[in-house]
Amino acid sequence: MTLSATLNAARRARELESLSAVDVLVIGGGITGAGIALDAASRGLSVALVDKHDLAFGTSRWSSKLVHGGLRYLASGNVGIARRSAVERGVLMTRTAPHLVKPMPQLVPLLPSMSAADRALVRTGFRAGDGLRRLAGTPASVLPRSRRVSAARAAELAPTVARAGLAGGLLAYDGQLIDDARLVTAVARTAALHGARVLTYVGASRVTGDSALLTDMRTGATLTVRARTVLNATGVWAGEVDPALTLRPSRGTHLVFDAASFGNPTAALTIPIPGERNRFVFAMPEQLGRVYLGLTDEDAPGPIPDEPQPTAGEVQFLLDTVNTALSSALTHNDIRGTYAGLRPLIDTGAGRTADLSRDHAVIESADGVISVVGGKLTEYRHMAQDVLDQAVVKRGLVGAPCRTRNLPLVGALGAVPDGLPASLVARYGAEAADVIAAATCDRPTDPVADGIDVLRAEFEYAVTHEGALTADDILDRRTRIGLVAEDRERALATAEEFVAGG
C-alpha cells in the first residue's frame, strides 16, 4: 500500500470500514492527539486517531498562535518547563515546521507609566530569554537577540503606540505560528503519511484500556475496535473519558481587529498588565490582515462547552489594558470578532489559574486508559513522546525509538517556486505550488470573496487533501475566515460549493 498525506472523505470511509484492531487508539484530534498519532505511526506502530468533531476543534485552535520560548515560566521559577519550551520552539523553527513558525518581534513600549524597576525587570527577562534560546541551540539567525530600540523605531513597528513620553522600546523575539489549527492539520497529515488512520467525526464511548465503541457521527454506524493501548488526549474533556481525572480549566480570551486599527503593525505590541508582574497583553499581527489581542486567564468552572465564549468583563479588560499604550483608544466598535479557549490545567487546589503549573501529566486509569493532561501547545511533541514512551513500556509495544524531533511535517521540505502569493506560501510552505496544481475547480487563483486573501484552490485542497468534511471545517479550522462573522458569511457559499463537490 502506498501511503499518502492526503485526507479526504473517501479515505476516511475506507479506513473506518476496515478498522478492527490497532496497536494504539488515540482519542482526541487536537495538537496533542495528532502529535501522539504521528509519534506512534513513525515508530512503526498501527494507529487510529478519532475525534467526535474535526481536527483542532477544541483548545488547539483558540491559542495566541505563539510558540513560546518559556520566558514566563522561567520568571515564575518553572525552569524545567522553560527549558523544554525553548528546546521545542527550536525544534519547530529549525527542523519540523519552519514553514509554519516564524520569528515574531515583541515590542514593550517604554512609556511614562512603566517604572524604572519594571523596565529593568523586563530587560532582565529578555536577556534571560536570550540565554534560553542559546541553551536550546536556536541560532540568532532564526531568533534575533533582544535589544532596546529608539522611539522612532518603536513607532515604526507599532504605529498606534502612544507617543507622549515614549522613551523607545524593548524588543525581543518569540515564535509565531501562521495558525495553530494549520499546525494540527499538518501533524495529522504527516501521521497519515506514516500510516495512521485519521478519523474525524468519530466518537468514542465505552472506553477501556484495550477497546472502545466507535460511532460514525455522520451515519450513526458503530463498531468496536481493539487496541494494545488506548490513549486519552481529549484536553479539557479528558474527564469524560476518565471520570477520575480532575482538571481546572481556565479561559483565555482574544479579540480580533482589522490590522488597520493598529496602523498595520509589524511587531506584537506587548503591554504590561497594571498591578501584575510578568503578565502582559499582546496585540499580535496575524494573517488575513488582522490583529489578535489577548489574552485573559480566568477560572472556567462548570460544564465544558464545545465553543467557549468570552465574557463582557474579559473583553473590557483587554480593551482597557491595550488602551494604556495607544495614542487613540480602541472601542467595542473596532472589534471584528472574539474567541476564547479553555486551558486543560491540572487542578492543584486553591490559587489563581494564572499561577497554576503548565506542566503535563500522564495518568493511567483503573481500567487501563492512559491519559495525558495539562501541558502547552509548544510542548506537544515532547508530551507525545512522553506518553508513547510510557505506553510502550506498560503495554510491551514493539516499535522503533521516537523520531519526531527530526521529522519534518508536510510542507516543510522542498523549493517554493517564484511568483506564488506570499499568503499561500505562509500557509502551505513547500506544498503551496501543489495547492494550485491539484485544483480542478474554475478560477482556482481567484479569492473566495473580495478582499480575502484565500484562494478558491485552498478551499478545494481543504476538502481533497486536508480532511475537511463541512463548510465549518473549511471556514473555521482549515482557514480562519470564520473569526470575523461578516467575512464568514461572504465566503460561506463558496465553502458549501466545495463541500458539495467533494
Image (spheres, rainbow, N blue to C red):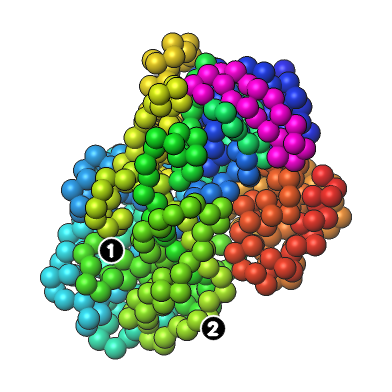
User: For the residue marked with disc 1, what is the amino acid?
Assistant: Arg
Q: Nearer the viewer, residue 35 or 17?
A: 17
* Residue 149 image label: none
**Helix, strand or loop at disc 2?**
helix
Q: Nearer the viewer, residue 238 or 171?
A: 238
The residue depicted at 30 percent of the width and 79 percent of the height is 151
Tell me if residue 347 comes above or below residue 194 in the rendering.
below
* Residue 333 image label: 2
Q: Which of 73 and 287 is in front in this view?
A: 73
Q: How crowded is mark 1: few (under 14 residues within 10 Å), some or many (20 or more)?
A: some
Residue 325: horizontal and vertical position, in percent?
A: 33, 79
The residue depicted at 28 percent of the width and 50 percent of the height is 356
The magenta stretch is: 208-227
Tell me if residue 181 comes above or below residue 292 in the rendering.
above
Q: Is residue 217 magenta?
A: yes
From the image, tell me which residue sits under label 1.
Answer: 279
Residue 260: horizontal and vertical position, in percent?
A: 53, 78
Check the image and name the residue furthest to the left. 117
Quarter containing the N terminus: top right
Q: Which badge, 2 or 1, is on the more N-terminal residue?
A: 1
Is residue 453 shown left or right of residue 44?
Answer: right
Task: State yes or no: discs 2 and 1 in contact (Cβ < 8 Å).
Answer: no
The residue depicted at 34 percent of the width and 84 percent of the height is 162
Q: Can residue 125 be seen in this view?
A: yes
Q: Does the magenta stretch include residue 394?
A: no
Residue 295 occupies quadrant: bottom left
User: For the residue marked with disc 2, what is the amino acid?
Assistant: Asn
Quarter containing the C terminus: top right
Q: Is the magenta stretch mostly helix, strand or loop?
A: strand
What separation in Å lies between label 2 and label 1 (alpha carbons)?
26 Å
